[in-house]
């Protein structure tokens, strides 16, 4: 796969995300071939949302955690600093690594799950949004019925792709991880809590629990999927798990802040939605200043979590800084 | 598991389905323990639809195909005629069989997928139904947002349960089978075609393709999941696959006929829906008489498919006859 990231030593985060985004786009371009009997209009609806140009943060976390956790002793195995690279050569790495197909399948699957959640969250019965990533939302273009079905299909496709592509020795663990983070105790459960808590005042602890489920679970799962695909040892898996938890919380605080401080043009979606819907947010509970400080504190904890991984986690540190410094 | 089916030699199909339904109900009663952090209201919504009292045909097909395909040479292995049973004894069989957890997980998962599809199909943006299995539909009780999220959660739970409970040697194949039958080339794709073809005249061949996807794929998958869980050889897996295809088509023809000939009280859901919505059906294309004959022809083909399995497929034959003779 020519678009796979072959060297990271001189990349900044936007360029790294762009390259991972290209690898993902290459994968998603094969979906019609993988599902040839699917109705054309359904695949159009799915592709419309998949290729709407998100940051691809979750797949990037899968692939960079996979890389950080892969042993540099294996032939062609990745290393983080670009100096102690194995025998694979820069062009051929990492797509020739034996566990790369497992990591790529997990990366594609988590982006499918993330995108499904956006399509369903935007529905009239849910957040009723007209704009997503600067374009009309899926149901505005394809109708509500198709948007519901496209979201449903993205979930089954995510699990089918892992079951088909990932090494059988890690596939059940990858599927269990992704399903658990997406399901009633994770993202979907968090969405239920979010809807239930509109116009209800939450305590900080309750807000944290809501965010841990609604966005944190999937971001943490992204990191763990990479570790699982790499066959990480317990210490490495614990490291990327803690990293994912702290970085996920920082991500959500920044999301809340951007909803207050940005314009719709900057974000590509409606802003001030939280206040308009009576949603609890970090700024509404703590104020802008203290929220920014809490995001920085979570970033520091995320960085510390990576110590055990040494130099091989350089790109993860870069991604975490980007998450907190982003302006959209 | 005391409710597991321990003997089938003197059962009729309703009693067999009732017993499998009990085993399923026992499994579903543990969902709150499996997902302790899920919001209560979400689990209520899920349980409302899961325990609404369907026929449990798909899980019964999983478990009976598993049984028919399991080698009688294994300790405690099932056999179909109740005479050549292994060493397990009637009370202990089949829940003590080594591959039973894989089959039960697949049975629970396919019922979760089937139920999710009913909840989403009933939504106002889809078929807009108020009545299902004699009770108000999920969104009528819990609201549209919760019905969407409950359906979504049932999908992730289905795959999580297989990944967690099934033997790792068969889990990826089970997940791939279930996802493929549910997704854009199966049930969900069929629903897209169904909506697209309202008020459009289909040819018989197009109607068959629609039904193969919308209902046939999942019924066939039920049979194949049982075979895969049992570690079936190619001949046995081919047999239950062909059985599932023919029985699935017969099932759909009867479904179409019942929509015309039954009352809402008999079916527990609205009738004459097909004609009211301008849907293509077997009766509308072939007439009542020819449709009934076609169902009987498909039943005969389903029966022939089972020849290779001999006596061990007796309960499958009984289930197939029940499918064609049922009045609801």
Image: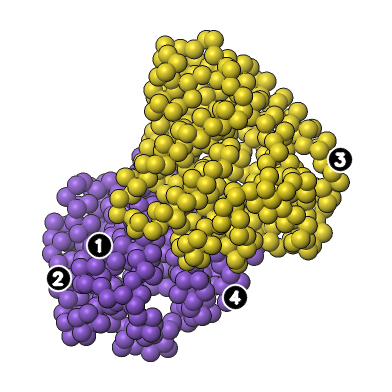
Chain colours: A yellow, B purple
Same-subunit check for callouts 2 and 1? yes
Question: Residue under circle 3?
Answer: A289
Residue A159 location in percent, x, y?
Answer: 43, 46
Task: Give residue B189's quadrant in the image.
Answer: bottom left
| Observer-nearest of A149 and A269 | A269
Q: Quadrant of the N terminus of chain A?
A: top left
Question: Among all residues in the image, which is located at the extreme front?
Answer: A265
- Do marks 2 and 4 share a subunit? yes
Instruction: Give the residue displayed 51% in from the left and 19% down from the top.
Output: A7
Q: Helix, strand or loop at disc 4? A: helix
Residue B142 found in image quarter:
bottom right
Chain bearing mark 3: A
Q: Nearer the viewer, residue B236 or A88?
A: A88
As drawn, the label of residue B300 is 2
Kindly identify which numbered label has been placed on residue B256: none
Q: Is residue B240 visible?
A: yes
Q: Which mark lies nearer to you, 3 or 4? A: 3
Q: CA distance from mark 3 to mark 1?
A: 62 Å
Residue that label 1 marks: B244
The chain carrying label 1 is B
Residue annotated with mark 4: B141
How far is disc 4 from disc 1 in space, using C-alphas?
A: 34 Å
Who comes first in sequence, dot 4 or dot 1? 4
Q: Is residue B55 above or below residue A139?
A: below
Q: Residue at x 70, y 26 (%)?
A: A303
Q: Are marks 4 and 1 in contact (CB under 8 Å)?
A: no
Callout 2: chain: B
Chain of the residue under label 4: B
């Amino acid at each position: 796969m020519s678009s796979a990231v072959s060297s990271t030593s001189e990349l900044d985060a936007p360029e790294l995300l762009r390259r991972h985004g290209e690898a993902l786009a290459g994968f998603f371009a094969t979906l019609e071939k993988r599902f040839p009997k699917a109705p054309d209009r359904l695949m159009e609806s799915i592709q419309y949302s998949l290729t709407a140009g998100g940051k691809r943060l979750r797949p990037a976390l899968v692939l960079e955690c996979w890389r950080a956790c892969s042993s540099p002793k294996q032939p062609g195995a990745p290393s983080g600093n670009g100096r102690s690279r194995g025998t694979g050569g820069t062009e051929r790495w990492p797509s020739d690594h034996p566990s790369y197909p497992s990591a790529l399948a997990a990366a594609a699957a988590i982006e499918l799950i993330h995108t499904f959640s956006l399509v369903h969250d935007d529905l009239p019965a849910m957040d009723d949004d007209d704009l997503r990533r600067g374009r009309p939302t899926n149901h505005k273009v394809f109708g509500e019925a198709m948007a519901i079905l496209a979201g449903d299909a993205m979930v089954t496709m995510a699990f089918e792709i892992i079951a088909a592509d990932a090494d059988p020795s890690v596939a059940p663990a990858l599927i269990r991880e992704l399903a658990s983070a997406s399901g009633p105790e994770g993202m979907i459960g968090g969405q239920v809590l979010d809807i239930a808590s509109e116009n209800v005042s939450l305590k900080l602890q309750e807000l944290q629990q809501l965010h841990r489920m609604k966005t944190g679970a999937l971001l943490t799962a992204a990191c763990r999927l990479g570790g699982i695909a790499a066959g990480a040892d317990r210490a490495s898996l614990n490291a990327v798990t803690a990293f994912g938890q702290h970085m996920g919380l920082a991500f959500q605080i920044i999301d809340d802040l951007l909803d207050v401080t940005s314009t719709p043009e900057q974000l590509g979606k409606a802003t001030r939605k939280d206040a308009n819907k009576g949603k609890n947010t970090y700024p509404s509970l703590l104020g802008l200043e203290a929220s920014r400080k809490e995001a920085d504190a979570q970033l520091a904890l995320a960085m510390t979590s990576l110590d055990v991984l040494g130099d091989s986690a350089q790109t993860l540190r870069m991604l975490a800084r980007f998450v907190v410094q982003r302006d959209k």
